[in-house]
């Protein structure tokens, strides 16, 4: 995966969102309103990257989480791992 390509930027954005949800909210001492603004901005960036990559090239579980809003509150990094593994498999083909 090219380190500055859209796929790498997507993985970094997902990782950053998961970290924000896990520890970043506490570290930043954001209010609930600030948390919502931050998450919305990050999700907008993720949606832009999905659009540039093409949704058909990404795992359906990730896309479903993005659509349902589950991705916005994920603190486990499960979607980072799913996307990373999916992109590695696609690259190997």
Image (cartoon, rainbow, N blue to C red):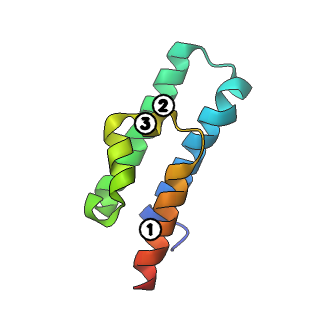
Work out how far the residue at label 2 is from the one at label 3, CA to CA, in angstroms.
11 Å
At 51% across and 28% down in the image, what residue appears? 38
Residue 78 position in % (x across, y down): 54, 50
Relative to 21, residue 30 above or below: above
Work out how far the residue at label 2 is from the one at label 1, CA to CA, in angstroms.
24 Å
Identify the residue under disc 2: 39
Disc 1 element: helix
Q: Specify the farthest residue to the bottom.
A: 93
Contact between labelled residues 3 and 1, with CB atoms less than 8 Å apart: no
Q: In this view, does 2 lie to the left or right of 57?
A: right
Query: Looking at the image, which is closer to me, 2 or 35?
Result: 35
Q: How crowded is mark 2: few (under 14 residues within 10 Å), some or many (20 or more)?
A: some
Look at the image and tell me whether residue 65 can be seen.
yes
Task: Give the label on residue 57, or none.
Answer: none
Q: Residues within 10 Å of mark 1 (few under 14, many from 20)?
A: some
Identify the residue under disc 1: 86
Whichever of labels 2 and 3 marks the residue nearer the N terminus, that label is 2
Work out how far the residue at label 1 is from the one at label 3, CA to CA, in angstroms.
19 Å
Q: Is residue 78 left or right of residue 40?
A: right
Disc 2 element: helix
Relative to 88, residue 59 above or below: above
Residue 57 position in % (x across, y down): 31, 66
At 55% across and 15% down in the image, what residue appears? 32
Q: Quadrant of residue 49?
A: bottom left
Task: Give the label on residue 70, or none.
Answer: 3
Q: Between tags 2 and 3, which lies in front?
A: 3
Contact between labelled residues 3 and 2, with CB atoms less than 8 Å apart: no
Q: Specify the farthest residue to the right.
A: 27
> Which image quadrant: the C terminus?
bottom left
Query: Looking at the image, which is closer to me, 22 or 36?
Result: 22
Residue 37 position in % (x across, y down): 47, 24
Residue 46 position in % (x across, y down): 41, 47
């Amino acid at each position: 995966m090219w380190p500055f390509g859209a796929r790498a930027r997507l993985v970094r954005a997902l990782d950053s969102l998961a970290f924000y949800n896990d520890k970043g909210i506490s570290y930043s001492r954001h209010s609930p309103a600030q948390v919502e603004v931050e998450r919305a901005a990050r999700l907008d960036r993720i949606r832009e990257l999905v659009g540039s990559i093409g949704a058909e090239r990404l795992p359906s579980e990730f896309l479903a989480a993005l659509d349902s809003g589950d991705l916005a509150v994920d603190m486990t990094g499960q979607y980072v791992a799913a996307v990373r593994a999916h992109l590695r498999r696609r690259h190997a083909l």
